Amino acid sequence: MKHKEKPGRRRFLTNGLMLAAGSTLIGPSLFGAPSILKYYNKPNSMINGVQIGVITYSFRSMGNQSAEATLKYVLDCGVSAIELMGDPAEAFAGKPENPVDRKAFSRLWKTKREGKLTRDQEKEMAELQAQTDSYNKQVAAWRGKVPMDAFAKLRKMYNDAGVTIYAFKPSAFKKGNSDAEIAWGMKTAKVLGASHVTVEHPSDDAHTLRLGNMAKKHGIYVGYHGHEQQTPTLWDTALGQSPYNAMNLDFGHYVAAGNKNPLQIIKDKHERIKSMHIKDRQTVAHGKGNLVWGSGDTPIIEALQLMRDNKYAFPATIELEYAIPEGSDAVTEVQKCLAYCRQALK
């Protein structure tokens, strides 16, 4: 049976979209404008005490993935704080270009999970894996010598435009990364102004202990991100290992994972949540879809109001994962998501 959208949520979504259409989100471009305009028309997505941010992964479909273009996307959305993915920042600092066809590699991984790889595809995948391993070694060597000045410059560029970086997510915190790379990622995050780094929860107690110990040494938090493996107790071991281990809760995935009363984990764990991803997913019973906000089962409105009413300090991070409608783009859809948040928090 098709899941029907609730009338109240539909009216709420319509009001939010009208707000987006009627709002002036950003004035003249900061790039190439006279310097006197540099500090004008700064974005502000702190809404009644709740910081709404966006993870720059949301703009992955946009053609230009440079740090400068990413900042422009953020500004055009009217967002004033972000979780920054590693690629734009590292490219800005001169990271070697990746020669691997990542889209082809991703398609092959999906085919492998489905158990449908042909012999020719197995050979192609092995070649791409070898290229990836070689590239990762090249990147590790580059990270060991890149000066921090470039990241300080990037932070200034973003801060001058009115955007702060509260979290940093480079590919430097996995089990296969060396201690030197992990230390590099944590040091870089601090230079960027982030309070925490984010990483997929490894489901490995030894690794969360390792990261927690290193985070304590560098004075920064590690926010572990979850998908459909999230349960109320997923983070308990890591949180008990170190006060520097924390949560990067994904509220939409938490709902799709089948957890009952999803607001309870925010109430119970708010002191250990450093940031929370928001998206609108359906429950298991309705198919677990990732939908336009207001169309799914995730109580985004209630979660934001809970944050507002209890003065929870962690940011709520827009993560655009639903299919972008024809004729639209990621910037337009993030604008709609922000308008939805404004409507919830007004």
Image (cartoon, rainbow, N blue to C red):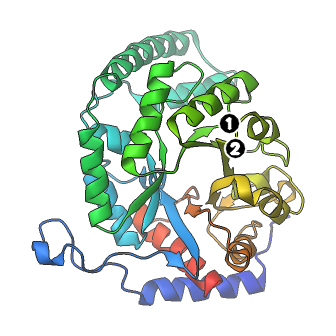
Q: Nearer the viewer, residue 21 or 52?
A: 52
Q: Nearer the viewer, residue 150 or 15?
A: 150
- Whether pointer 1 and pointer 2 mark residues with C-beta atoms closer than 8 Å, the reply is yes
Task: Identify the residue under disc 2.
Answer: 226
Q: Is residue 284 visible?
A: yes
Mark 1: secondary structure: loop
Q: Amino acid at mark 1?
A: His
Q: Quadrant of residue 162?
A: bottom left
C-alpha gap between disc 1 and disc 2: 6 Å
Which label's residue is closer to the chain start, 1 or 2? Answer: 1
Mark 2: secondary structure: loop
Q: Residue at x 64, y 61 (%)?
A: 279
Q: Is residue 213 above or below residue 177?
A: below
Task: Identify the residue under disc 1.
Answer: 201
Q: Residue at x 57, y 84 (%)?
A: 16
| Relative to 234, 192 lies left or right | left
| Relative to 91, 326 lies left or right | right
Q: Residue at x 43, y 19 (%)?
A: 132
